Image: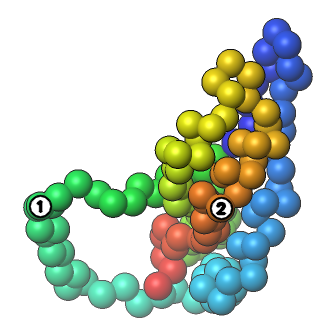
């Protein structure tokens, strides 16, 4: 996610290179093919919703969305829409972080700690008229 220009650092632009792994997914290729198809999809009318059971213990993992959702809409009927997002699973090593200098942390030391703490996954979601 890019950051705004500050008093000490210039602004940053979001890199498109991080999203190239999206197009390698079979699911994404299938959804893009359906997105580009001009046929109207058959959408069932009898969708049954199920309630989630209440949680008995706190969540073990937290997924975060990196950046903003990018939507693409097909401009002619049936007005299909898909969205691309990149998610990340983050795990923090408290012991490793405790060894870092709190006053002046070295960026490469932080990079080394975080290199095995995150798992990224880029995907696409069908939003409208894609089954």
Q: Residue at x 74, y 52 (%)?
A: 112
Mark earlier in primary sequence (2, 1): 1
Judged left or right of residue 108, residue 27 is left
Crowding near the residue tagged with mark 1, few <14, some 14–19, many ≥20 C-alpha atoms within 10 Å? few
Residue at position x 85%, y 13% in the image: 8
Q: How far apart, in angstroms, are the residues tagged by discs 2 and 1?
A: 29 Å
Side of 42 where 39 appears, left or right: right
> Residue 115, how many percent across, how many down?
70, 57
Q: Residues within 10 Å of mark 2 (few under 14, many from 20)?
A: few
Residue at the spot 79% in from the left edge and 37% down from the top edge: 107
> Residue 60 at x, y = what percent?
33, 60
The reply to whether residue 129 is in sight is yes
Q: Give 124 or 40, whichever is nearer the viewer.
A: 124
Q: Is residue 84 visible?
A: no
Secondary structure of the residue carrying tag 2 is loop
Task: Tell how many labels.
Answer: 2
Residue sitting nearer the eye, 57 or 20? 57
- Does residue 58 appear left or right of residue 36 in this picture? left
Residue toward you, 112 or 29:
112
Local SS, label 1: loop
Who is closer to the viewer here, 109 or 84? 109
Disc number placed over residue 56 in the picture, else none: 1
**Are the residues at dot 2 and dot 1 in contact (C-beta closer than 8 Å)?**
no
Could you tell me which residue is drawn at 59 percent across and 46 percent down?
96
* Location of residue 109 by image quarter: top right
Can you identify the residue that label 2 sits on? 116
Spot occupied by residue 98 in the image (x, y as percentages of width and height): 56, 37
Looking at the image, is 76 positioned above or below residue 118? below
**Which mark is nearer the camera, 2 or 1?**
2
Residue 88 coordinates in the image, percent (x, y): 57, 59
């Amino acid at each position: 996610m890019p950051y705004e220009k500050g008093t000490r650092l210039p602004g940053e632009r979001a890199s498109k290179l991080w999203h190239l792994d999206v197009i390698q997914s079979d699911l994404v290729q299938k959804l893009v093919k359906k997105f580009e198809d001009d046929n109207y999809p058959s959408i069932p009318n009898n969708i049954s919703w199920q309630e989630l059971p209440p949680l008995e213990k706190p969540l073990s993992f937290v997924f975060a969305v990196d950046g903003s959702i990018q939507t693409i809409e097909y401009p002619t009927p049936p007005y299909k829409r898909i969205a691309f997002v990149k998610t990340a699973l983050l795990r923090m090593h408290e012991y490793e972080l405790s060894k870092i200098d709190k006053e002046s942390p070295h960026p490469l030391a932080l990079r080394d700690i975080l290199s095995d703490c995150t798992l990224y996954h880029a995907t696409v979601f069908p939003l409208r008229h894609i089954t």
